Amino acid sequence: MFEPMEMNDNKTNKYIIWLVPFVCIFFYFDWMKPGHKSLDLEPHLNYFKDLADAFLHGRLDVTNTLNDRDLVHYNNKLYLYWPPMPAVVYTPLVAIFGTHLPDAFINILFGILNIWLFMKIVSGLNQKFNLNYTTKQLLCLGFFWGLGTVHFYMAMEGTVWFVSQIMAQTFLFASVYFLIKSKDKRGPLILSGLFFAAAAYTRNNMVFAVFFLACLHLAMHPKLQWKNGLRKAFIFGIPFIIFSLLNAWYNQARFGDYFENGIQYHLMNPYFYENFKQHGYFSTYYLSHNFYTEVLHMPSFKAQFPFIQKEEEGFGFIWGSPLFLLLVPAVILQIRNYSNGIEHDVAIVSRRLVRTGCWLAALPIAFVIFCIMGTGWYQFCARYTLDFQFFLVVYLLFSWQVLADIPKIKWIAFILILASIVIQFLGTCIY
């Protein structure tokens, strides 16, 4: 997004795919947070490793937790209400090393893997759809994702809440990556379906990512016949069907109900109890407050470093990552172009299909997030919004050609990326 470079060949892109995560490693480890120990072996609030230990001992309830904070109490046993996929990932680690694991270090590794997958995806989309991004532009976008979003500080924490979201991104990115590579091969397609299912059973709202994946696949195969499309959809969906059956059994075995995840027995913080008692866990009652807090609410500032005031409910993600402010002119200009009939050839229609898929995934995920009883308390910025931020980045990626009509847009975007990185760096100092 800035001054073009002459280097834009595949060989150069391979280097930057590794360069961005390598640089981010130096920001994700202990040097950035005084007193924070990423290799700390002391127990943390990471219930997934406790559940992994329970799996290894033939149980579904956890017994060796530090406390019962945010757990489910049912029939004198403690359970997790979060989907169990991260515990499955932790099972071999716990089997080998036990439950005293460096949780922050493991989460950082997944965070770095996410950045690498992100770079693979944007580089692949750049080539597949002839987006003509330069090496410098892809570098800037990669650093924005790795250092300019809430992914930055979240990957540095090893608690259950952050592990869940970071690992969900790993599965989502892996699903997109294998879908891009699938072509007409069954192997990558079923791997894409496997990782999509893993994402959905790490964060249930990620199930709506299927709309983006479907639009992306159709955009890559504009001449796909419906019979072949149904066959591919079935192959892709097999892992999700299997995971859904296993999850239903998991719920039945714990609570006697295939559709009960235990949230009604949740030992929640008193901060939430009154709202939960009156409105439940999921309700449109929370929509206006959560939308304001997680999107529009500006941060409060102070005179001392790190200058941003700590707010337990956080503030709007567009202020934490100001590059997302470009969504407003991007949407307006895309609507104008569509109304004027500018987008008509096959390549442009394919790009429009991808952009449509971004919103078909992002909006329902956001709706779910805005209708749950909390905003991600306590947090820096708006951590729940990480679930849909990837789709917004892809939308901007496919909208740069229309944004290029704005005077000085390269410098505007560059400044917004720098601002995003600075703000998120301050967040690592606050949290």
Image: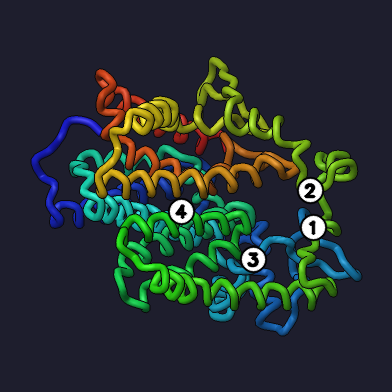
* Left or right: 367 in relation to 307: right
- Does residue 51 lie above or below 336 as drawn? below
The structure residue drawn at horizontal position 58% and vertical position 66%, both measured from the top left corner, is: 86
How far apart are the alpha carbons under marks 3 and 2?
22 Å
The tag on residue 48 is 3
- Quadrant of the drawing holding the C terminus: top right
- Does residue 55 lie above or below 165 as drawn? below
- For the residues labelled 2 and 1, say whether their Cβ atoms are less than 8 Å apart: yes
Provide the residue designation for mark 2.
281
Assign a secondary structure to mark 3: helix
Provide the residue designation for mark 1.
263
Front-most of residues 130 and 203 = 130
Where does residue 370 sit, x and y in percent of width and height?
A: 66, 40
Front-most of residues 333 and 34 = 333
Provide the residue designation for mark 4.
212
The kind of residue on which mark 4 rests is: Phe
The structure residue drawn at horizontal position 58% and vertical position 31%, both measured from the top left corner, is: 295
- For the residues labelled 3 and 1, say whether their Cβ atoms are less than 8 Å apart: no
The structure residue drawn at horizontal position 78% and vertical position 36%, both measured from the top left corner, is: 285
How far apart are the alpha carbons under marks 3 and 4?
28 Å
Q: Earlier in the sequence, mark 3 or mark 4?
A: 3
Front-most of residues 139 and 391 = 391
Crowd band around label 2 with a 10 angstrom C-alpha radius: few (<14), some (14–19), many (20+): some
The kind of residue on which mark 1 rests is: Ile
Residue 159's image quarter? Answer: bottom right
Crowd band around label 1 with a 10 angstrom C-alpha radius: few (<14), some (14–19), many (20+): some
Q: Earlier in the sequence, mark 3 or mark 1?
A: 3
Any part of residue 422 in sight = no
Q: Earlier in the sequence, mark 4 or mark 1?
A: 4
